[in-house]
Image: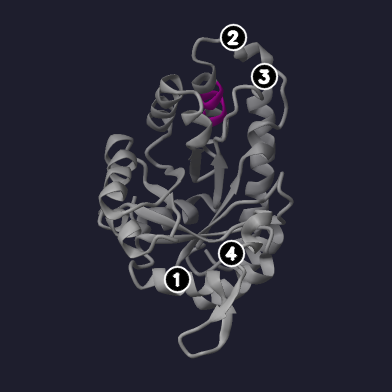
Amino acid sequence: MNREQLVKQVKDKKNYLCVGLDTDITKIPKHLQSHPNAVFEFNKAIIDATKDVCVSYKINTAFYEAMGLKGWEALEQTVHYIPPTHFTIADAKRGDIGNTSAQYAKTFFEVYNFDAVTVAPYMGEDSIRPFLEYEDKWTIVLGLTSNKGSNDFEQLMVLSGAGEQQFLYEKVMQKVAAWGTPDNLMFVVGATKPEQLAEIRKAFPEHFFLVPGVGAQGGSLAEVSKAGLNKDGGILVNASRAIIYASDAETFATDGRIVASEYGQQMKLSLEGIF
């Protein structure tokens, strides 16, 4: 999916919600746990219930890899089931030397045909370049993440090229931005840091941001929207647990849809005056 198509989805639906399919088989409703294909059946129900109130789905590959072959099969079934109108993200956080990254890129862009994959930038350009070489695919680079440990490295103070103090994540994002364009490169910016998000938006006015951390992690959708929206929408706000685990009843998918719809209504209001 190229930028024009992604922006059209946001504009047409007045929505920038990404539903995270971080499906933990131990947390899905008990009536599904004995199903021979429990994870896919759960995901299928969530997709059916939410596809008209979101523009994107993000699959955190760790939850599938942990199940071995069966998990990879569920991942493949899930990504194939998502409608082609929706932006698909492999939240894999890959990044390695060039020839290894080329295989990761092939895995997620060719074998599974995701629109985007998350990538860790700290091994440098050769670890990211293979992902950027794919046409109409997106590389989503970790910028400022929402986890507590982001203080350990991302928020260290370093010297900029001009000899001034700046955060390490700022220096990394500036460097990475030169390797791609706003048409194939996004950044992850956590919802729990809206003040920094506003500053990052000033520094990168055209790029899309993937913003996790709304809902279970405590991020505010209103604050994120105010800080991050641009003329194209420009953000995909991810919510996972708040939607997919809205309840453990047999009505879990309907209950998840209610939460997703509430987010969607807030997003529609935030987009007034933009579209």
Q: In this view of the protein, which residue sits in the foreground, 116 or 267?
A: 116
Q: What residue type is labelled 3?
A: Pro
Asked whether the residues under the numbered discs 1 and 4 touch, taking CB atoms below 8 Å apart as contact, a structural biologist would say no
Q: How far apart are marks 2 and 4 (CA)?
A: 42 Å
Residue at 72%, 56% in the rendered image? 220
In this picture, residue 233 sits left or right of residue 119: right
Helix, strand or loop status at disc 3: loop
Residue identified by numbered label 2: 34
Where on the picture, by quarter, is residue 130? bottom left
Look at label 4 and name its amino acid.
Answer: Phe
- Amino acid type at image mark 2: Ser
> Closer to the N terminus: mark 2 or mark 1?
2
Q: Real-space Cα distance between discs 3 and 4?
A: 38 Å
* Residue marked by disc 1: 206
Query: Residue 79 in the image: x percent, y percent?
Result: 41, 33
Look at discs 1 and 4 and give the one toward the viewer. 4
- Residue found at x 28% / y 54%: 98
The local crowd at label 3, few if under 14, some if 14 to 19, many if 20 or more residues have their Cα within 10 Å, is some
Q: How far apart are marks 3 and 1 (CA)?
A: 41 Å
Q: Give how far across and how far down residue 73 sits, in percent.
A: 40, 23
Q: Give the range drawn in magenta.
A: 42-47
